[in-house]
Image (cartoon, grey):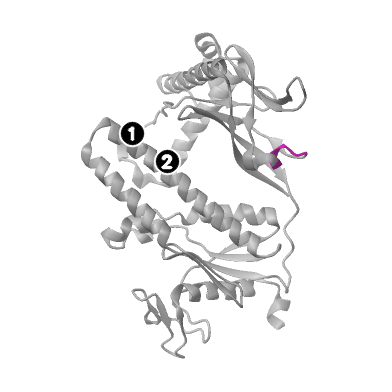
Amino acid sequence: MQQVLTIKLKILPDEAGKKLLEETMAAYSRACSFVAERIAEDHLPLNRCSIHKAVYRSCREQFSLPSQMSASVIRTVTASFRSIKTSKERHPSRFSKKKRNSLTVPRFRVPQVSLVWNRDYSLMWDKSHTQRLFSVNTLAGRIRVPFRADAFGWAFEKGVVFGTAKLVCRHGKYYLHIPVTVDHADPVPLCPETRVVGLDRGIRFLAVSFDGEKTCFASGAPVKRKRAHYKELRKELQFRRTRSARRRIRSLGQRENRWMGDVNHCLSKALVSHYPAGTLFVLEDLTGIRSATERVRLKDRYVSVSWAYYDLEQKLKYKAGRAGSHVINTDPAYTSQTCPVCGHAERKNRNHEQHLFRCCKCGYRSNDDRVGAMNLWRMGIQYLPKAQVSA
């Protein structure tokens, strides 16, 4: 079974190499803007062959890009136009009527460049054959740059295939974002003895897991406090209305996203490593949760709308896939209102303010998030082969 992951490698060019990389990225971004404007002005169809015939020679002559980079410019611009079109079709309410019916030209303000494996960049050894280097194509030819693999040493093993990378610069540091295709064993087939884990996601607890015997809680209080701190800091900076404040707001948003992504990475890794290979994780299908949470009180809306449910789900899925486990989504209706003992479902069973579940029929009491995880576990048991039910 194959899986595509994106790794982020920090490269360490010298001063001359940095200058060449900066010039190459700037030329690539200018070329992307040029091609996007030509498509809009000449009303070119979003077809790479048609665009190639119209702008390829001009792109090479005007920006001095190598042939492969010129072709990558066309691919990047075409993908951006299609992405905007798809976004309008899926989320029309986010665009005004005028913008929905007109062509939106993408902007390429951030310097970057796409590098095709074995054409624009490749791996090689240094002269002493002791250190691996990246050979990266620039406007002035190839340069060799060392890099830091850190936790991605596994990406250089046999059987790992590199894809088209993106070279970016963040705060004076250069990174290669490389999609890699990894082969791993197929998931362990489901059987009556499969370990089932119900996983309820929320705000008070990031995740509550129940495996039929034990319940584990991952508190969300530290995350909620830190995100509230970021919110207040952004509010203060917005009040200043200065250029430096706006730059600070953008950097804060990026920092918060990186921090929240790391929290979800650690949590998903802990869940997958805690249970054996072949485990079945059962999650609620939270598609459309944003529109539902927008109906909460205004003071609680920011926390509810911006919570990273989907990010945790995606990280859990790819980590479980590498570990040979399974992840499924189920209908979330009434999972926190249904009694796991007698099956009675009623809204009065759950007390949101006290986070308490008390069945109005049989009197069973427990934490409401734990009850949600227990009901998800029960759905997972029903998902297993029929032999599990008869047993």
Disc 2 target residue: 254
Q: Quadrant of residue 254?
A: top left
Marks 1,2: beta carbons within 8 A: no
At x 47%, y 79%, the residue is 338
**Are there few (<14), some (14-19), or many (20+) residues within 10 Å of tag 2?**
few
- Count up the numbered dots: 2
Q: In the rendered structure, which segment of residues is drawn in magenta?
A: 154-158
Q: Is residue 314 visible?
A: no
Residue 112's x, y, as percent?
Answer: 50, 26
**Are there few (<14), some (14-19), or many (20+) residues within 10 Å of tag 1?**
few
**Is residue 248 located in the magenta-colored stretch of the structure?**
no
Residue 325's x, y, as percent?
Answer: 68, 60
Instruction: Answer with mark 1 or mark 2, whichever residue precedes in sequence.
Output: 1
Q: Is 79 situated above or below 327? A: above
Q: Is 27 situated above or below 216? A: above
Q: Amino acid at mark 1?
A: Arg
Q: Main SS type for the magenta part?
A: helix
Q: Is residue 207 visible?
A: yes
**Is residue 157 located in the magenta-colored stretch of the structure?**
yes
Residue 264's x, y, as percent?
Answer: 52, 54
Q: Is 172 situated above or below 92? A: above
Residue 274's x, y, as percent?
Answer: 64, 64
At x 78%, y 38%, the residue is 158
Left or right relative to 330: residue 241: left
324 and 144: which is toward the camera? 144
2 and 221: which is toward the camera? 221
Q: Quadrant of residue 239?
A: top left
Disc 1 target residue: 247
Q: Amino acid at mark 2?
A: Gln
At x 53%, y 75%, the residue is 375
